[in-house]
Image: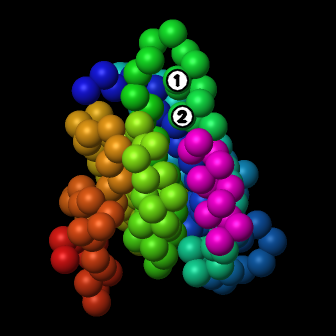
Amino acid sequence: PNMSNHIHVITMGGTIDKDYPRLTSGYAFEFGDESAASRILNAHPNLGVSFDVKSICKKDSLEITDHDRGLLFDAIFKTFKSSSSSSSSQNPRIVVTHGTDTMIETALALQRELGDSNCASIAFTGATKPERFIDSDASFNVGLAVGATSVCSPGSVVICMNGNVVPAEECMRTGDGIFTWR
């Protein structure tokens, strides 16, 4: 495929972007100013890709509304338009960071909304622990999603979690939180 070397990262919030509280003690996590994906990608100076990051919302995925999903869809359509107007005419690569509870639901809604107009390789990912935690799966999952966008066909919407790249329509989450095939 004629894939771009540029990644469009779109953030929706979720555990991946949660940060330690600034004012209160305990586990009342907040969303920080910089996204986890931005910190992860900026920490690797030898990436073979460039990237930009756009925040749609900073919410736990159980709080994401249809309006928030509509803003995501609009951002992706704008990415299509800017990619089609560029001289390189390469297929866009999009990584969406999202909370894990409703990630599949949003990915499926996006797939329905885009239909045959999807010219991108779109990968959803997140984390089971905040990226700020030393034992977080965030950097592994973001790397998996970036890599997946280089090999998945244009028009694909995939979930990239737990070392698996699964088409959204074939993805399920097991009782212990693992994203896998139905």
Q: Are marks 1 and 2 in contact (CB under 8 Å)?
A: yes
Question: Can residue 15 be found in the magenta stretch?
Answer: no
The residue at the point 44 percent across, 17 percent down is 89
Measured from the top left, where is residue 78 in percent x and y? 63, 37
Q: Which residues are magenta?
A: 66-77
Identity of the amino acid at label 1? Ser
- Residue placed most toward the observer, 105 or 14: 105
C-alpha gap between disc 1 and disc 2? 6 Å
- Residue placed most toward the observer, 69 or 16: 69
The answer to which image quadrant residue 18 occupies is bottom right
Measured from the top left, where is residue 147 in percent x and y? 29, 39
User: How many numbered discs, if any?
Assistant: 2
The secondary element bearing badge 2 is classed as helix
Residue corresponding to mark 2:
80
Residue corresponding to mark 1:
84
Direction from residue 20 to residue 15 in the image, left or right: left
